[in-house]
Image (cartoon, rainbow, N blue to C red):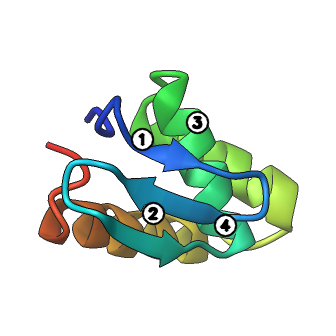
Amino acid sequence: MSILRNVAISESGFLFNPTTGDSFTLNDTAIHIVSLLKENKNKEEIISSIVDKFDVEKNTADKDYEDFVFSLKSYKLSN
């Protein structure tokens, strides 16, 4: 999965899509996921990183990942 290259993300979690003018505010987990997606990490690497960084169960990390990826796709921010 690749996040659109032209999407800008600030350190505070503000995501801006210059193509559409849409903007979003991301929580800490979403910021972490986006940064790992931009590094071309795969799903398992991202879930493992969420578990480690946020001290959550793997099932929770997987659900967070899947929900966020669905949101990215629904807003056409990834393919």
Q: Where's residue 75, x and y in %? A: 19, 68
Q: Where's residue 74, x and y in %? A: 14, 70
Where residue 56 is drawn, which disc sits there? none
Give the CA separation, mark 1 to mark 3.
Answer: 9 Å
Q: Where's residue 11, x and y in %? A: 77, 52
Give the CA separation, mark 4 to mark 3.
Answer: 11 Å
Residue 35 as seen in the image, left or right of residue 16: right
Give the CA separation, mark 1 to mark 2.
Answer: 8 Å
- Residue receiving disc 2: 65
Could you say whether the residue bearing mark 4 is in a helix, strand or loop?
helix
Which amino acid type is shown beneath numbered disc 2? Tyr
Give the CA separation, mark 4 to mark 1.
Answer: 14 Å
The quarter of the image holding the C terminus is: top left
Q: Nearer the viewer, mark 2 or mark 4?
A: 4
Residue 56 as seen in the image, left or right of residue 4: right
- Residue receiving disc 3: 36
Q: At 32% across and 49% down in the image, what residue appears?
A: 18
Q: Nearer the viewer, residue 12 or 66?
A: 12
Q: Where's residue 41, x and y in %? A: 50, 27
Which amino acid type is shown beneath numbered disc 3? Leu
Which amino acid type is shown beneath numbered disc 1? Lys
